[in-house]
Image (cartoon, rainbow, N blue to C red):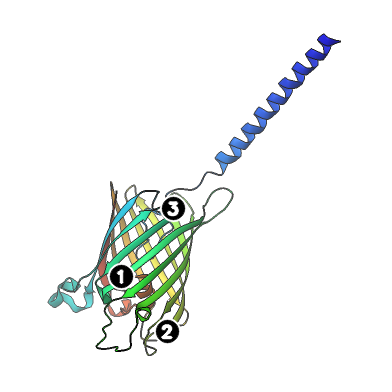
Amino acid sequence: MKPIYFLMMTLFSGFVANAQEDLLSGLDATQAKNTNVTAVFKGLQIITLQSTKMAAKKEFYFVVSHRFGTVKDGISEFFGFDHATTKIGGIYGVTDWLSVSGSRHTLSKMYEVGAKYRVLRQNDAFPFEVVGYSTIDINSLLKKEDYPKIEFSDRLAFIHQLLISRKISEKLSVELAPSFIHRNLYNPEIENDNQFSIASGGRMKLTKRLSLNMEYAYNFNKPGFYSNPLSVGLDVETGGHIFQLLFTNSQSMTESGYLTNAAGNWSKGDFFFGFNLYRVF
């Protein structure tokens, strides 16, 4: 009986090994099928609105942005180039799902610190990329002489966004971004302490290194003094640089200012030219 027993055990072991190999092959196929979608957006911003693109772990981005004055003033102000506002900052990828940022804006002498964190990836099992983005703005323009009782907390504004994107095809990506903005100090005649908005944006790839971008935000409780922001731009990819050329009716480059304080009006030719430059290290 021993030879028969040995033969049966050998055949059974071979069957188990083959079954395990088939099972592992099936799991590998499933994992390959659920590969994460890449290059939903090329830039960390669509135009001014944040995109769902994240800085990779240990990557550092140096950021320089300009928004010039309104083109409506014409040649006397060199179509806005005489009145530039600047943003200089950096973004660091702590992990592949978390990055931190800091920047300084000449408009309102604003400092901004932020965190961007990935929640979900787009793949065959899930149709969207989901990223959270939170910032704190610090307004250093406010002076004690004008506001004798001002405290540090009065300088702060808080912004929370949920960025939801989908790469529809190799050429087209879209995004939806509900946002909440809170200001500790505000002028009730022209703004609110709490403001809700929902923004949308998209990227259409034109060539290997060029894409057309557009974004718009609607503010639900916007005072009549400001407009809803509308921007259009081009992404130009040049090796380690992403160069974005744009036109917008919102001169501010912080999330709180861009979304809620758009002073320009496209219908009156009142809009601003600008650019974003990203250099990755």
Q: Earlier in the sequence, mark 3 or mark 1?
A: 3
Q: Earlier in the sequence, mark 3 or mark 2?
A: 3
Is residue 87 found left or right of 34 in the rendered image? left
Amino acid type of the residue that numbered disc 3 sits on in the rendered structure: Val
The reply to whether the C-beta atoms of the residues labelled 3 and 2 are less than 8 Å apart is no
Q: Secondary structure at mark 3?
A: loop
Q: Position of residue 219 (x, y in %)?
A: 44, 78
Residue 40's tag is: 3
**Hey, which quadrant is residue 90 in on the image?**
bottom left
Q: Residue at x 26, y 72 (%)?
A: 272
The crowding category of the residue bearing disc 2, from other C-alpha atoms within 10 Å (few below 14, some 14 to 19, many at least 20), is some
The crowding category of the residue bearing disc 1, from other C-alpha atoms within 10 Å (few below 14, some 14 to 19, many at least 20), is many
Amino acid type of the residue that numbered disc 2 sits on in the rendered structure: Asn
User: Mark 3 or 2, which is nearer the eye?
Assistant: 2
The crowding category of the residue bearing disc 3, from other C-alpha atoms within 10 Å (few below 14, some 14 to 19, many at least 20), is many
Q: Is residue 253 visible?
A: no
**Distance CA(mark 1)–CA(mark 2):** 20 Å
**Distance CA(mark 3)–CA(mark 2):** 34 Å
Q: Position of residue 100 (x, y in %)?
A: 38, 59
Q: Position of residue 247 (x, y in %)?
A: 29, 68
